[in-house]
Image (cartoon, grey):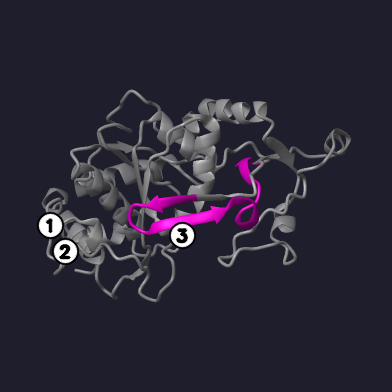
Amino acid sequence: MTVGRFAPSPSGRIHMGNLLCCLLAWLSARQKDGKVVLRIENLDTARCKRPYAEQMIDDLRWLGLDWDEGPGVGGKDEPYYQSERTALYEAALEKLRQKGLVYPCYCTRAELHAASAPHRSDGQVIYAGTCRHLGEEERAAKDRPGAMRLLVPDEEWAFTDGHMGRYSENLARECGDFLLRRSDGMFAYQLAVVVDDAAMGVTEVVRGSDLLSSTPRQLYLYHLLGLTPPEFIHFPLLLAPDGRRLSKRDADAGLEEAREKLTAEEILGRLAYLGGFNPTAQPKSAKELLSDFDWEKVPREDIRIPEGLFEK
């Protein structure tokens, strides 16, 4: 059986890009008579507030995007808030430690992001391995706790995305040893998402193309932990009318304002129009969109929201 999921991060009020992700994940799983899991990714509890999560849950219910396991429903894989699942991440980290693949890193944010540090074309830092070969005495002399990094091989990890096609990355040259846990004890997204998707039996991950480059790292973690990876399906990002990335902080294309003006069916119909599988943006329920949905209709380039689309 297909098991899909949506895993929003409640760092603010949900925007249309988040909603398109939830809609596509829901349609892709439901069209295969599959199951949907809702997981709240609130590792950063300082930014991800419980009221935002509760509002997000209410928004999804209002839109008719239901789930079979998750908050308010329960299920065999409780809890469904990542902040309550840290024992699972610690166990995975320990397994990697036992393999001799984890080491502490004491680099500051400023050092990592310095102009002299290697960067990818998209601006992401490529970790240079600065702390990889520190000896025990050097580590003991540090006056602060270290973050935990994973040693990566100088080899290519490739996969075929369900929508974007083949993607590959050399982990050593295009990523570097990546974080598993920050110096403040917060577990990194890469480790938590792998552990959770595997534990919850997720077979299909639908998410934005901004996470495409994360997939080789996650596949490497699946391999090291002896877990079966899901199929990955990435879709293009929604952009603001001026071409900017949508931001919860800036309240771009937010649901809060749209919900005051439009019905759930009007919002879903317009999202489906942007997604390429509703030709005239007419109002439709989530269930009505099941017969229209086809991954072949979904664009592969980022989508700019037309001015005023989510106005009355």
Question: Which mark identifies residue 278?
Answer: 2
Q: Which residues are magenta?
A: 158-182
Label 1, residues with CA under 10 Å away: few <14, some 14-19, many ≥20: some
Q: Vertical placement of 136 versus 263: above or below?
A: above
Q: Nearer the viewer, residue 164 or 264?
A: 164
The reply to whether callout 1 and callout 2 are in contact (CB within 8 Å) is: yes
Q: Is residue 229 left or right of residue 5?
A: right
Secondary structure beneath label 1 = loop
Q: Earlier in the sequence, mark 1 or mark 2?
A: 2
SS class of the residue under badge 2? loop
- Per the image, the residue denoted by label 1 is 284
**In this rendering, the label closer to the viewer, 2 or 3:** 2
Q: Which amino acid type corresponds to the residue marked 3 in the rendered image?
A: Arg
Q: Name the quadrant containing residue 245.
A: bottom left
Residue 68 screen position, x and y as percent: 25, 33
Q: Which residue is mark 3?
A: 249
Using the numbered discs, state the Cα–Cα distance from disc 2 to disc 3 in whole angstroms: 29 Å
Q: CA distance from mark 3 to mark 1?
A: 29 Å
